Image (cartoon, helix red, strand yellow):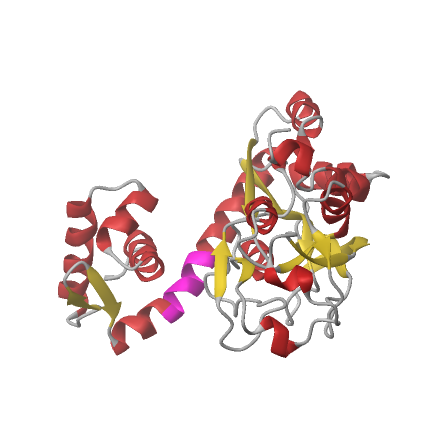
Amino acid sequence: MLRLSLEALQIVDAIDRRGSFSAAGKELHRVPSTISYTVSKLEDDLGVQVFERNGPRVELTAAGAELLKEGRYLLKAAQDLEHRVRRVASGWETELAVGMDSMFSACLFHDDVPAFYEVAKQTRLRIVQEALSGTWEALLQRRADILVGAAGDGPAGGGYVSEPLGKLNFVFAVAPSHPLAAVQDKLSRTHLQHYRAVSVADSARQMAPRTVGLLLGQDTLTVPDMKTKFQYQVAGMGFGFLPEPCARAAIAAGLLVEKEVDEPKPAETFYLAWRSGENGAALNWWIDRMRQPGLFERLISQLPHHNVDQGQ
């Protein structure tokens, strides 16, 4: 008789990612007592300790880490099987998650969502936003089924199809009140190391996070998305690179000053991507829809803009 259950593995996975029983319970919509009971029963059944308890925080033991390492393969296989069975039955997925970089606004899909619901009667739609490496991780870990506007090349190892949508240039900018605005020379590392950078947090949970335009040991204000970064830089709270379309509007309005730097940020390519070998009707609909001309221009139009974000 098997002593492991997929439910127990799912709970162990959530506890490891979230760091506590209570946080795992919130993610899985279970009361803490259910989480605690399931873990205790698993430990009793296996005869090993899975977690070290340190107050509210918990950490995997060596045995627990090995269990979860292999257990995640089982969870993924079970999820894949569930999706395949449902697709075979109807041709349409029960749920489809459309992922996009948090740089852009989910309002991008204002016209696409109603059009999808007209043809997809059985598929629940979920729109998720991630940042930097977290966007690609979401695809590979099935938190998203298709990516629209994923930044940078995908991770090595394959398992996905990607198509470039376009390139976006970036501008180094500070508020006119920022000390760097008064520097006449091109800004070097020596100039930058004395001041605070504003950076968007990489939402990756397991992949190595990306750091863009930061120096080792740099004082950094980390924010959740590009809209917040833009607002904080306009407010003079730090420096950093901004997408050229939104930076230009703020520079023209006198809200930001463009500065030359010794190490400019290269243009970033953004991609449309989905996992290899999947052909559900809902996924195919979104691939075809996102391949229509003008998608990248629509993405750019959703970038932060000073007239909107400053309430003007």
Residue in view at x 64 percent, y 63 percent: 180
Q: Is residue 162 magenta?
A: no
Above or below, 11 relative to 128:
below
Rendered image quadrant of residue 282: top right
Relative to 185, 69 lies left or right:
left
Q: Is residue 71 magenta?
A: yes
- Measured from the top left, where is residue 96 in percent x and y? 57, 39
Rendered image quadrant of residue 97: top right
Which quarter of the rendered picture does the C terminus lie within?
top right
The residue stretch that appears in magenta: 69-76
Which quarter of the rendered picture does the N terminus lie within?
bottom left
- For the question of whether residue 162 can be seen, the reply is no
Image mark count? 0
Residue in view at x 64 percent, y 27 percent: 120
Residue in view at x 63 percent, y 38 percent: 105
Relative to 75, 183 lies left or right:
right
- Measured from the top left, where is residue 66 in percent x and y? 33, 74
- Measured from the top left, where is residue 256 in percent x and y? 69, 49
Residue situated in front as seen by the camera: 231 or 267: 231
Magenta stretch mostly in which secondary structure?
helix
Residue situated in front as seen by the camera: 180 or 16: 180
Residue in view at x 69 percent, y 67 percent: 183
- Measured from the top left, where is residue 146 in percent x and y? 64, 47
- For the question of whether residue 268 can be seen, the reply is yes
